[in-house]
Image (spheres, rainbow, N blue to C red):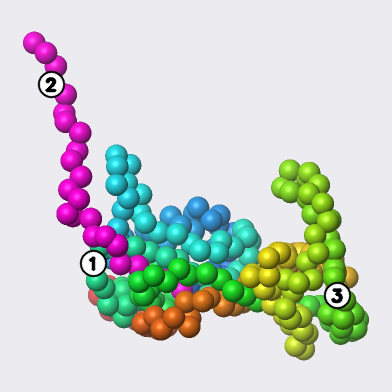
């Protein structure tokens, strides 16, 4: 008797909307969650979206994957606000309902800021990013003069090395540095991501004479300016995450 082999699954082309609607999720990462990796961040967000009941779209084939991407991954250990994830869904959605459902499904320290739909033909792209750093009192006095000296220069060259320690050569990072300021105890640096050259927060520490071992892990990516903000996308501010979770905790206590 010949063996019977199951036939390969047939993908119905009608069941796949083209193009799939796109949703932007803007959020922040803080506390201990800042130490999770990029891939763990994607998995955590995906699981929360599934728990929230979003009509998440998946890729085709035998191993379908959720169609979700984090557009500007943050370094491990760095807290961040204005994180942006692009999520494809299979039906038209209401951003307000999505935001309310997602807040309840996210873990603490994963703070939802808003949900927006993306207009057709718009490709979200970061323009600038702003980092903040709390500076110790002993290091503040000399910073204003160092900042002024750095901004007055037409160039600032750094010797780049890759992750394996191999030298990549000299790079002029000055065109990528848009603003540097000290606001009381907070050092604020804004980098231009469209300058054609990149600058790293740790390179700014060296330029300003601040020890990397003391401050390298303290940077917060406080803001990212995206081109999508001027594209007229319908947005819905998320309800306060802590207020929603507090209400849920009260409901659980009452039921008990």
Residue on which the image places disc 2: 4
Query: Which label lies toward us, 3 or 1?
Result: 3
Return the x and y of residue 250 as percentages of the image width and height. Answer: 33, 80
Q: Residue at x 43, y 55 (%)?
A: 43
* Vertical arrangement, residue 179 with respect to residue 208, above or below: below
Q: Can residue 183 be seen in this view?
A: yes
Query: Which label lies toward us, 1 or 2?
Result: 1
Query: Which label lies toward us, 2 or 3?
Result: 3
217 vs 152, nearest the viewer: 152
129 vs 253, nearest the viewer: 129
Residue 154 tag number:
3
Q: Is residue 205 left or right of residue 88?
A: right
Determine the image quadrant of residue 188.
Answer: bottom right
Q: Is mark 2 on a helix, strand or loop?
A: loop
Residue on which the image places disc 1: 91
Asked whether the residues under the numbered discs 1 and 2 touch, taking CB atoms below 8 Å apart as contact, a structural biologist would say no
Judged by its main secondary structure, the magenta piece is loop
Q: What stretch is highlighted in magenta?
A: 1-26
Q: What element carries label 1?
A: loop
Q: Is residue 104 visible?
A: no
Return the x and y of residue 255 as percentages of the image width and height. Answer: 25, 75
Q: Is residue 176 left or right of residue 156?
A: left
């Amino acid at each position: 008797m010949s063996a019977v082999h199951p036939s390969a699954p047939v993908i119905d082309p009608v069941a796949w909307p083209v193009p799939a609607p796109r949703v932007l999720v803007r959020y922040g990462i803080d506390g201990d969650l800042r130490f999770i990796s990029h891939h763990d961040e994607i998995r955590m967000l995906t699981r929360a979206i599934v728990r929230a009941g979003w009509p998440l779209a998946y890729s085709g084939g035998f191993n379908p994957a959720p169609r979700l991407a984090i557009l500007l991954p943050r370094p491990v250990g760095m807290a961040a606000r204005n994180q942006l994830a692009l999520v494809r869904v299979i039906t038209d959605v209401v951003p307000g309902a999505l935001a309310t459902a997602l807040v309840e499904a996210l873990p603490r320290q994963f703070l939802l800021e808003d949900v927006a739909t993306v207009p057709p033909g718009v490709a979200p792209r970061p323009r600038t990013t702003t980092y903040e750093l709390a500076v110790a009192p002993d290091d503040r006095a000399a910073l204003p003069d160092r900042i002024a000296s750095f901004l007055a220069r037409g160039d600032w060259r750094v010797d780049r090395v890759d992750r394996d320690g191999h030298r990549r050569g000299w790079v002029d990072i000055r065109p990528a540095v848009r603003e540097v300021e000290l606001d009381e105890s907070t050092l604020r640096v804004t980098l231009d991501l469209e300058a054609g050259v990149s600058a790293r927060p740790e390179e700014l520490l060296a330029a300003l004479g601040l020890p990397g071992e003391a401050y390298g892990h303290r940077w917060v990516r406080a803001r990212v300016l995206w081109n999508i903000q001027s594209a007229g996308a319908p947005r819905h501010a998320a309800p306060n995450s802590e207020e929603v979770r507090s209400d849920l905790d009260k409901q659980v206590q009452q039921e008990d």
